[in-house]
Image: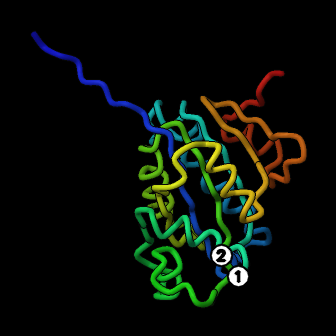
C-alpha cells in the first residue's frame, strides 16, 4: 500500500530588505519599485510561480526603518534564517544578518510579509535575486513571531501599517492603506480586487 505524502503548510513571517539609496539612483519611486518587484514574483501572470504559491495568503507591510525602529526590528531578525543577495556589500550583509547593528550605513526599506505557507519565502528571495531587482539586499525568515498576532505586534513596534492583502490572485487594500501600486498596475499583473 502506497501512502500519500502531505506537506503541512506552516504560517510564518519574513522581512525583505532593500537599499533605498541604491534604488533611488535609477527609480523615481523606490517604494513602488520594491512592491512591484515582490508582487510580480507571486502574481497570476508569472508562469514560473507554482500554483500553491500564487494561492497562498500574504499580508504586506512596507516602510523605511530608522535607527529607533531598527533596534526593535533587530530583536526579531537576529533569531531568523538569513538569506542575502551575493551582489551586496559588507554593510548591507551585516544589516540583513544582524552581524553589526551599531549603525545604519544605508537607508533600509523593508517589506514585512506574513504568509500561510512559509515555503514561499525561499521562492520569492530567489526570484528577486534572479531578476536582479535593484536595491534588493536579502531577507530574514523569522523564527519569531510565531503567530499572526505576534507579527502584528512586531509591525506596530516598528511603525509599519497594513498595506495590502493578497490571496489566490485577489488583492485588498485595507482602509487607510498607503500602498503605492495603483489598481491598474495590480490588474496588469493579473490581480483582481476582492469583491466586497
Percent x, y for residue 83?
42, 66
Residue at the location (46% across, 64% down)?
Answer: 129
Alpha-carbon neighbours of circle 1 within 10 Å: few (<14), some, or many (≥20)? few
Q: Is residue 12 above or below residue 70?
A: above
Q: Is residue 136 above or below residue 130?
A: below
Alpha-carbon neighbours of circle 2 within 10 Å: few (<14), some, or many (≥20)? many
Closer to the camera, 7 or 133? Answer: 7
Name of the residue lying farthest toward the right: 176
Residue at the location (73% across, 70% down)?
Answer: 64
Image quadrant for the N terminus?
A: top left
Q: Do the residues under discs 2 and 1 have CB atoms within 8 angstroms?
A: yes
Mark 1 lies on a secondary structure that is helix
Percent x, y for residue 50?
44, 36
Quadrant of res 20: bottom right
Image quadrant for the C terminus?
A: top right
Judge left or right: residue 62 versus residue 114.
right
Percent x, y for residue 33?
70, 62
Closer to the camera, 131 or 73? Answer: 73
Judge left or right: residue 43 versus residue 117.
right
Residue at the location (43% across, 49% down)?
Answer: 123
The type of colouring in the image is: rainbow
Residue carrying label 1: 67
Residue at the location (44% across, 71% down)?
Answer: 85
Residue carrying label 2: 70
Q: Is residue 89 above or below residue 82?
A: below
Mark 2 lies on a secondary structure that is helix
Report the Cα–Cα distance between label 2 and label 1: 5 Å
Specify the label residue 172 is tagged with.
Answer: none
Amino acid at each position: 500500500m502506497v501512502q500519500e505524502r502531505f506537506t503541512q503548510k506552516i504560517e510564518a513571517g519574513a522581512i525583505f530588505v532593500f537599499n533605498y539609496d541604491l534604488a533611488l539612483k535609477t527609480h523615481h519611486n523606490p517604494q513602488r519599485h520594491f512592491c512591484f518587484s515582490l508582487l510580480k514574483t507571486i502574481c497570476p501572470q508569472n508562469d514560473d510561480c507554482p500554483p500553491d504559491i500564487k494561492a497562498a495568503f500574504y499580508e504586506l507591510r512596507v516602510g523605511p526603518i530608522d535607527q529607533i525602529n531598527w533596534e526593535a526590528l533587530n530583536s526579531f531578525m537576529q533569531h531568523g534564517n538569513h538569506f542575502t543577495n551575493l551582489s551586496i556589500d559588507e554593510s548591507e550583509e551585516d544589516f540583513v544578518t544582524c552581524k553589526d547593528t551599531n549603525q545604519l550605513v544605508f537607508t533600509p526599506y523593508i517589506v514585512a510579509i506574513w504568509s500561510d505557507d512559509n515555503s514561499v519565502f525561499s521562492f520569492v528571495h530567489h526570484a528577486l535575486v534572479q531578476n536582479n531587482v535593484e536595491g534588493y539586499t536579502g531577507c530574514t525568515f523569522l523564527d519569531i513571531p510565531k503567530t499572526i498576532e505576534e507579527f502584528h505586534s512586531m509591525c506596530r513596534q516598528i511603525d509599519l501599517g497594513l498595506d495590502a492583502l493578497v490571496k489566490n490572485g485577489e488583492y485588498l487594500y485595507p482602509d487607510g492603506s498607503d500602498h503605492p501600486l495603483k489598481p491598474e498596475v495590480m490588474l496588469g499583473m493579473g490581480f483582481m480586487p476582492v469583491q466586497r
